[in-house]
Image: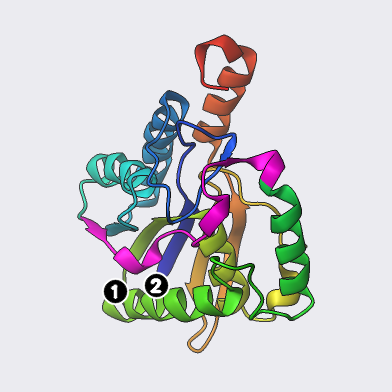
Amino acid sequence: MTIWLARHAETATPTLFHGAESDVELGEHGQRQALAAAEWFATQQPTVVISSAMIRASDTAAPIAARCAVPHLIEPQLYERRVGPLSRKPRAEAEQIWNETNDRWQRGETAFAFPGMESFDELRDRTVPVFTRIASTYPAGRVVIICHGVVCKVLLVSLLKGRGPGDWNTIGRIPNLAMSELVSLGSAWETRQLLMVPPPVLAVNELAAANPLKTEA
């Protein structure tokens, strides 16, 4: 089987720090990204599209499922990390706390979390069983999963052969609609592509960069 694991498109307020507490919608640029991604995924011929119930993930997945003429299913437990008091804060204000969290997870302190926030262990224990259930439900399927950046990274370092929390910083950042193509090895997973942004989405991003007044900040 093949699973494409991808982050949602850009939100309407990309300069703010969003978590499970902020069910923000896509911005105009994000909507264009989702439509561009739908064209790319159509060439991959998926059999089902699955997303978290959060608006930014569901509204990214919906045009992909429609373009590919396949079901769009919801997995509520794939919601973004709970970030408590950081929700909807400017990214600059959240950066120090987030960077310290990343560093401590990479050092193996996976139970660490600031008050009101979700730890790596809690994220792993919530999301890995969902991924495993999806894989067992579609053993010969071609599945697109649209969820959230931190969720994607927790799944990647938890599931990929030879990876672990120590790879948290080295695995790379996860831009909007960055996609990892995962194939099953039986008891583990490997990647054919890791955090690749589909070319049609890159084209939309380049156009937005060239015309910044036509998109959100």
Cα separation between marks 1 and 2: 8 Å
| Relative vertical location of residue 203 with respect to residue 167 in this rendering, above or below | above
Residue occupied by mark 1: 138
In-front residue for pair 40/72 = 72
Residue 75: say if magenta: yes
Residues at marks 1 and 2 touching, judged by CB atoms closer than 8 Å = yes
Q: Residues within 10 Å of mark 1 (few under 14, many from 20)?
A: some
- Judged left or right of residue 65, residue 182 is right
Q: Say whether residue 186 is magenta.
A: no
Which one is earlier in the sequence, the residue at label 1 or at label 2?
2
| Residue positioned 54% across, 69% down in the render | 118
Q: Position of residue 39 (x, y in %)?
A: 38, 36
Kindly state the secondary structure of the residue where label 1 is placed.
loop
Percent x, y of residue 110: 66, 79
The picture places residue 177, in percent across and down from the top left corner, at 51, 45
Choose top left, top right, bottom left or bottom right for residue 32. Answer: top left
Question: Which residue occupies 37% across, 75% down?
Answer: 130
Q: Amino acid at mark 2?
A: Met
Q: Which residues are magenta?
A: 72-93
- The one nearer the camera, 80 or 193, is 80
As displayed, is residue 210 above or below residue 55? above
Residue at image mark 2: 1
Q: Secondary structure at mark 2?
A: loop
Residue type pointed to by label 1: Tyr
Image quadrant holding the C terminus, namely: top right
Percent x, y for residue 86?
Answer: 58, 51
